[in-house]
Image (tube, grey):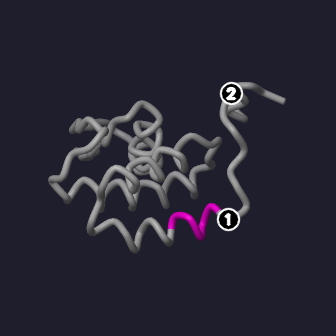
Amino acid sequence: MNLLADLGWLRRPPIDLRDRCRSLGAEASEPNLDFDTALLDVANHALDINQLIWLNKLVSRRWSNPVDTILARFGLGLLGSATLSLISSAIPGSGLRHFTLIDVVEGD
């Protein structure tokens, strides 16, 4: 087991993670403290890239609502000479572990 590759300090994702993300997606238009807490709970698991992409979609919806509860907001610009889409989709989900909504903008 590789501690860094397996994110050994985080809990394993629950079996019903996809269902949790779907139910959160239905609630994303009216975020509140309970929504943000549930979003943080999902983020605090050892998620693979596909699961981080699901979470990224939820963060994007949450970002569009100006209601602030416990999450800080941060805009991040990425500039690079290679494809950054895999990295940029993982950053918002990882930012939630630190109580931060991150909006990633990629440049060419």
In the image, residue 25 sits, relative to residue 99, either above or below, namely below
Give the x, y percent position of residue 41: 53, 46
48 displayed left or right of 58:
right
Residue 75 coordinates in the image, percent (x, y): 21, 38
Q: Would you say the magenta stretch is mainly helix, strand or loop?
A: helix
The residue beneath circle 1 is 16
Residue found at x 45% / y 51%: 39
Identified by mark 2, the residue type is: Trp
Residue 69 lies left or right of residue 26; in this view the side is left
Q: Secondary structure at mark 1?
A: loop
The quarter of the picture where residue 79 lies is top left
Q: Nearer the viewer, residue 108 or 101?
A: 101
Residue span colored magenta: 17-21
- The secondary element bearing badge 2 is classed as loop
Residue 21 position (above or below residue 33): below
Instruction: Give the residue at mark 2.
Output: 9
Q: Amino acid at mark 1?
A: Asp
In primary-sequence order, the first of circles 1 and 2 is: 2
40 left or right of 44 in image: left
Q: Which mark is residue 99?
A: none
